Every structure is written in structure tokens, then in C-alpha cells.
């Protein structure tokens, strides 16, 4: 997995609440058996007309946001399906950090598996970052995971919380499976115990 | 010992390793797999030279892409991409040696219907699947939730998940339901009350007399939509209803093991005085037959209501409601019972079980659906289909004018050929009314099976209480 340490980039504002995984990547694009190539269809139905032309007023189609690396979004971002195609599409587009007042649980977990940092902040701070994002390409935010700080284009610093284990995995780009297999002996002894206690499982 | 919730007990019974910061390796008893979210996970195993840790606890079935029309064994019925996904599952199931129900097997169906039906899902288990509606299995008092594809690979390789414990939330439905009110109305009413983010960070335990009175089918409907309320999982403590459903199923324990299992299952309840971090209580008698008007499952109103005005909301919901109402082609103040319907879809992991079909048959028996109405009933599994045939329900549906399909997810998420066209309006027994969910620019109103049946007859969203 790609490491996430410090990122300075353009933030795109998407104030709509309840942006669901069907909006992030509609199911017609779930038929691939690969993990890559979803970026061009990120937010497909909001981003393109039926004939494939771009919808000019969608944020990521505006010239100043085409190379956004951060998304500042409305409440409950990523609700709906468990499809990891949603964070795959976000990462493939080039977005590495999403800020919102809340995220759906499965989407939140999926982000960390794909080098994306989801940040939860109170409403006033998300509002402030939304305003900063609305300034466009000259307004670059910095997200520093090690320091757990976002710096706005005006130099205002906002701290954020992140789970220590997940932070470490992102900073070092660690593979979960490899880490778990190091604890295989605990799993083996659990299985031995359960074969006695709950053999029907 | 301090009192524990049902969730606490199941969690504690599955922690294989706990780190100092509370990060746990949670042991997974059953891993359900379908064709859409698993190919990249199996590919990951292959690339790393890993095997499936517990193939005997891994159950695969194709459901999302499969056509539901006759002759579907003919691969030409699927698009190339769909066929590749289904064939990839065929190949992966064989290569890694997991239990498998292919399209040609009568037991094939929606993964969340097949699991319980075959007795794979048992009380007190941990059950995961790369699908958010895994919450369904919570009806058995199992801790069940959706996972992403990276986690699918993790479970395949290690039979565990890296997890931190969620908070406890209690949703109590007191008293009795009124006639015409169903499990679907309960679960939608709860989401209407708490919002789609109301359960985020929690595992919900549903309890109270109205929940106890539900059959297993009804309990599965309630837990299925826990995810729509944002919760990681929904649970209902096992009881006699649960045991009698499970007993005798192909993979349920037998003989002395059954007795041992039963003894443990009987300890799976929330202790008196256990702590809940959040409590929501609804009176069963206050719940009415409900429908959704918007594009979020929280956009719920009693069928007697009117389309709301976006200005009635606050914050970001004002813009979201405006967008929803425009997308849905509705007018604020319009009576919900005046909304005309083009299509009725009955099925899905929410409402594709035998009891749902009995409820539909009761409404449509000896009647005809409205002229021009497109109405389809899609059983949740081949066995549900067979049972409905045997009980004579299928004949009732066909005579009323419904299309009676083969098992699959079908128009719930429209990954197979069953889709809404642009602007087409559907009363659906499924679980999501998101923009484009049932087809590009399609419009979805979520309802109970009986309400969907009523809409098929009248051509409008209809109060089922007017027909009973």
C-alpha cells in the first residue's frame, strides 16, 4: 500500500450530505475484476451526461478542481454499499484525503486499506475548510498525518484525531494480512480452544 | 462480573488477540462470498501465494449479476463483464476449495438468504461478507456485518478481521403492531427516526414485544436494514423462534452437538442492567405503513403523508431534500397516495423470503395488476421459489399478471438485466432508494411487500389498510 505522510494539494468542496457509494461509483462499473481504472468513473452520474460529455458545473469538472487531492464533503459520506470500488475510484482519481463531519463505517475502514486518509471534524471546522476549498486552485491545504494537523491556505491550523493503529499503517504503508499472520499462533490457539468449546462451528 | 449486552458477549467470545490499544483480531465463524466483491481478493491470495485459511467456513454463491429469467444457464444472457465475474467465482471456489452453490444449483440465491436457509448462520456466530446487507444474519443473534474487498482477502487468508469494538445501541419496539404494519415498516420507521447516520459507530440490538413477535423472516428484514441506519450490525437475541427455524437445516448441529449448542445459545441475551450508549424506543402501535419519498432511506413518511417541503429541513438536508424531490419528480405538498407507479419490484435480501410472498399473495389473490403495470417477483433463493410453487403462490402471482422469476438480487441493484429506465417509477421491497440504484435516473419508493402488492393493483402508492 502507498504510504500517506504529508500532503499539500487542492481541496474540492462537495457540501451535499449523504453522498452514497452508488454516487461515488455506480454499479455498472463494479463488473471489473481488477482494482484499478475506476477513477475515470468516479461520481460518474454527477460528472457526465448520458452521452459521455462532462457536466460543466460539477466540481471536479471545473478547471480549478480537476487535479484535486483532497475532498471536503457533507455529513455521512460514503453511506450505502460495502463496495471497495468506491475508495478505489477515489484513489485512482488522485484524491488521498476526505474530510467530513462523519463517514459510513465500512467506507471509513476501506479508505485506510487503500492509502486514503478519512478525517472526521466538527461541523464548524468542516465549514471553515469548505470555505477554504471554495477558493479554488490557489488555495492549497496541507494535511500532515504525523502531526495530525490540517493547515488551511490562510495558515490556520486544525488538529484531528486518528486511531493510532490505523495511523501507523498509513504512515508506513503496512499490509494488514502480513501483520495478522505474525499473530498466527494466537489464532491457532483460539481455533484449538473453540474446537473443544464450540465444535458445531 | 459486570452485566453484558448481547453484543458484548458475542464480541468477547471471538477475540483471538487483543493489542494494548484495544485493536483486536476478531475470529470469523462464517465468511460468505459473492461474485462482485471477491475476485480482487482471490487474485490477491494468488499473487501472494496464500491459501484460504478455513475453506470449510467459507461459502460462495453468485447472486448480484445473475439473470433471473428462464434459460439463464445460457451464458449469452449475461453481458461479457457479468459473465467474467460469475466465471471467476466458479473458478475461485473450485481452486480454493470453498463451499459453492453455482447458478445451476437449486439452492442458489441471494447470499443472505442462502446462508440462513442452509443453516450456515447460527446464533452467537460472527458472520461477514463483502456486502453491506450482511447485517441480515443478525436476526439469529449473530454478529454480522459487511466488509470491503481488502477485508475479504484478510478473512480468506487469516479467518480474522482487525477490529475495534463498536458502541452499544438499543432499539426497542414496544407493544403490538397494528394490522397492515410489517417488519419492513418497523425498520424504515426506525431509520426515519434516527437518520442514515444515527447508528454510525454502533451495533444495534433490536428488542421489545413487537420484535419478539416477529418470525425469523421478519427479524431478518429488520436487521437487514440496520446498515441503512449506519450501524455496523443489528442483532436480535435468539429465542424459541430462532431455534425452531435453525433446527434440522442442512448445516445446523445435530444430536449431542445440537444440545451443546442450544445450551450456549441460551446464554446469549443482554444481562439485566447492561449499559447501552444510545437508546431509541418506538411504540409498535404508533408505527404506520410507510414509504420513502426521496433518495435516502431516511426519507420516510407514513403513507398518509405528503411530499415535504425542503425548507422544512435544516442544515445540509435542505439542499439534499431539494435535490431528491427534483430527482424523484415530485411536488412538495403532493399526497403520497397520489403518486403513480410504473413498476413493482418484489424481492431482494430485505424481502425475498417465503413469508414476504405469502403476504403478497394474500393481497393479490384473484385480482389483476393494473393495466400497463410492469410487476416482477424475484425469489431470494431457488428453494424459496420451489416452496412458493408448492404452496400455490406462484400461480396466484402469474394469474394476477406478475412475472415470476428465478432467484437473484435482480432489480434491487440492477447489476443484471433487470433495470429501471430513465424516469421510470418503482415501488420496491428492496433496501436502497439512492439515485440510479435501480437504473440510471430510475425512481424508487421503498415499501413493504404488502404495500408493493397494493401498488401493483391500483397503479399508485396505496395504503394497504384500505385493502384489508
Image (tube, rainbow, N blue to C red):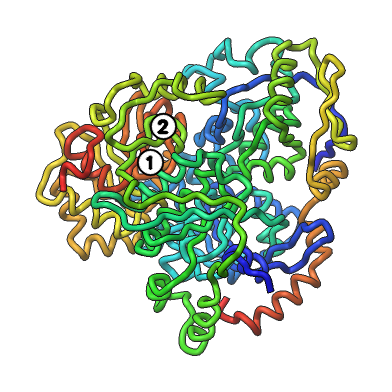
Q: Is residue B51 visible?
A: no
Specify the subunit that label 2 lies on. B
- At x 60%, y 36%, the residue is A78
Count neighbours of disc 2 (C-alpha within 10 A) and say few if under 14, some if 14 to 19, many if 20 or more: many
- At x 73%, y 18%, the residue is A67
Q: Nearer the viewer, residue B302 or B48?
A: B302
Which quadrant of the view contains residue A83?
top right
Specify the subunit that label 1 lies on. B
Q: CA distance from mark 1 to mark 2?
A: 8 Å
Q: Is residue A141 above or below residue B112?
A: above
Residue positioned most to the bottom: B256
For label 2, the residue is: B439
Q: Which label number is shown at residue B387?
A: none
Image coords of residue A96 (percent x, y): 75, 31
Residue positioned most to the left: B366
Confirm whether circles 1 and 2 share one chain.
Answer: yes
Q: Is residue B40 above or below residue B253?
A: above
Image coords of residue B137 (percent x, y): 49, 60
Instruction: Say whether residue A154 is left or right of residue A111.
Output: right
Count neighbours of disc 1 (C-alpha within 10 A) and say few if under 14, some if 14 to 19, many if 20 or more: many
Instruction: Say whether residue B371 is left or right of residue A34.
Output: left
Local SS, label 1: helix
Contact between labelled residues 2 and 1, with CB atoms less than 8 Å apart: yes
Local SS, label 2: loop
- At x 27%, y 52%, the residue is B178
Image coords of residue B268 (percent x, y): 54, 72
Residue positioned most to the right: A147
Q: How many marks?
A: 2
Q: Which label number is shown at residue B411?
A: 1
Amino acid at each position: 500500500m502507498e504510504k500517506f505522510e504529508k500532503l499539500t494539494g487542492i481541496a474540492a468542496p462537495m457540501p451535499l450530505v449523504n453522498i452514497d457509494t452508488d454516487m461515488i461509483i455506480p454499479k455498472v462499473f463494479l463488473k471489473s475484476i481488477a482494482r484499478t481504472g475506476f477513477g475515470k468513473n468516479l461520481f460518474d452520474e454527477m460528472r457526465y451526461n448520458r452521452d459521455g460529455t462532462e457536466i460543466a458545473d460539477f466540481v471536479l469538472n471545473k478547471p480549478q478542481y480537476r487535479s484535486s487531492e483532497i475532498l471536503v464533503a457533507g455529513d455521512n459520506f460514503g453511506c450505502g454499499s460495502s463496495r471497495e470500488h468506491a475508495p478505489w475510484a477515489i484513489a485512482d482519481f488522485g484524491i488521498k484525503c476526505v474530510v467530513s463531519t462523519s463517514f459510513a463505517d465500512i467506507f471509513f475502514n476501506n479508505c485506510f486499506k487503500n492509502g486514503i486518509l478519512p478525517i472526521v471534524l466538527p461541523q464548524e471546522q468542516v465549514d471553515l475548510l469548505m470555505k477554504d476549498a471554495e477558493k479554488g486552485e490557489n488555495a492549497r491545504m496541507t494535511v500532515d498525518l504525523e502531526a495530525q494537523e490540517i493547515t488551511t491556505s490562510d495558515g490556520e491550523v486544525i488538529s484531528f484525531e486518528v486511531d493510532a493503529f490505523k495511523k501507523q499503517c498509513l504512515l508506513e504503508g503496512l499490509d494488514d494480512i502480513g501483520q495478522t499472520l505474525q499473530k498466527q499462533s494466537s489464532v491457532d490457539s483460539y481455533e484449538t480452544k473453540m474446537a473443544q468449546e464450540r465444535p458445531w462451528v | 462480573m459486570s452485566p453484558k449486552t448481547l453484543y458484548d458477549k458475542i464480541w468477547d467470545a471471538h477475540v483471538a488477540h487483543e493489542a494494548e490499544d484495544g485493536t483486536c483480531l476478531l475470529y470469523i465463524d462464517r465468511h460468505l462470498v459473492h461474485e462482485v466483491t471477491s475476485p480482487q481478493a482471490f487474485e490477491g491470495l494468488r499473487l501472494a501465494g496464500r491459501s484460504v485459511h478455513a475453506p470449510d467456513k467459507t461459502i460462495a454463491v453468485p447472486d448480484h449479476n445473475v439473470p433471473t429469467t428462464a434459460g439463464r444457464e445460457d451464458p449469452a444472457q449475461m453481458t461479457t463483464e457479468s459473465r467474467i465475474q460469475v466465471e471467476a467465482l466458479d473458478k475461485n471456489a473450485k481452486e480454493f476449495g470453498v463451499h459453492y452453490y453455482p447458478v445451476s444449483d437449486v439452492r442458489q440465491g441471494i447470499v443472505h438468504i442462502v446462508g440462513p436457509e442452509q443453516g450456515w448462520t447460527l446464533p452467537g456466530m460472527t458472520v461477514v461478507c463483502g456486502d453491506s446487507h450482511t447485517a441480515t444474519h443478525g436476526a439469529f443473534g449473530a454478529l454480522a456485518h459487511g466488509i470491503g474487498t481488502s477485508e475479504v482477502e484478510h478473512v480468506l487468508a487469516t479467518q480474522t478481521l482487525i477490529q475495534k469494538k463498536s458502541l452499544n445501541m438499543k432499539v426497542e419496539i414496544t407493544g403490538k403492531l397494528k394490522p397492515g404494519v410489517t417488519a419492513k415498516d418497523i425498520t424504515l420507521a426506525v431509520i426515519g427516526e434516527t437518520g442514515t447516520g444515527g447508528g454510525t459507530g454502533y451495533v444495534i440490538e433490536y428488542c421489545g414485544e413487537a420484535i419478539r413477535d416477529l418470525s425469523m423472516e421478519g427479524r431478518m428484514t429488520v436487521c437487514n436494514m440496520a446498515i441503512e441506519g449506519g450501524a455496523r450490525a443489528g442483532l436480535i437475541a435468539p429465542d424459541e423462534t430462532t431455534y425452531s427455524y435453525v433446527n434440522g437445516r442442512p448445516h445446523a448441529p445435530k444430536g449431542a452437538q445440537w444440545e451443546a449448542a442450544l445450551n450456549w445459545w441460551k446464554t446469549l441475551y443482554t444481562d439485566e442492567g447492561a449499559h447501552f450508549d444510545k437508546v431509541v424506543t418506538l411504540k409498535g402501535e404508533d408505527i404506520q405503513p410507510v414509504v420513502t419519498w426521496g433518495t435516502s432511506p431516511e426519507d420516510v413518511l407514513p403513507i398518509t403523508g405528503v411530499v415535504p417541503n425542503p425548507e422544512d429541513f435544516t442544515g445540509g438536508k435542505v439542499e439534499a431534500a431539494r435535490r431528491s424531490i427534483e430527482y424523484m419528480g415530485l411536488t412538495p405538498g403532493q399526497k403520497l397516495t397520489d403518486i403513480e407507479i410504473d413498476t413493482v419490484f418484489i424481492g431482494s435480501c430485505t424481502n425475498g423470503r417465503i413469508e414476504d410472498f405469502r403476504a403478497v399473495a394474500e393481497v393479490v389473490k384473484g385480482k389483476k395488476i393494473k393495466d400497463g403495470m410492469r410487476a416482477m417477483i424475484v425469489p431470494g433463493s431457488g428453494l424459496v421459489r420451489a416452496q412458493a410453487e408448492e404452496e400455490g403462490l406462484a400461480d396466484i402471482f402469474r394469474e394476477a399478471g406478475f412475472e415470476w422469476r428465478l432467484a437473484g438480487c435482480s432489480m434491487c441493484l440492477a447489476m443484471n438485466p433487470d433495470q429501471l429506465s430513465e424516469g421510470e417509477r418503482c415501488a420496491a421491497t428492496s433496501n436502497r432508494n439512492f439515485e440510479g440504484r435501480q437504473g440510471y435516473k430510475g425512481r424508487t419508493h421503498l415499501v413493504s411487500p404488502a404495500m408493493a402488492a397494493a401498488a401493483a393493483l391500483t397503479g399508485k402508492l396505496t395504503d394497504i389498510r384500505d385493502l384489508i
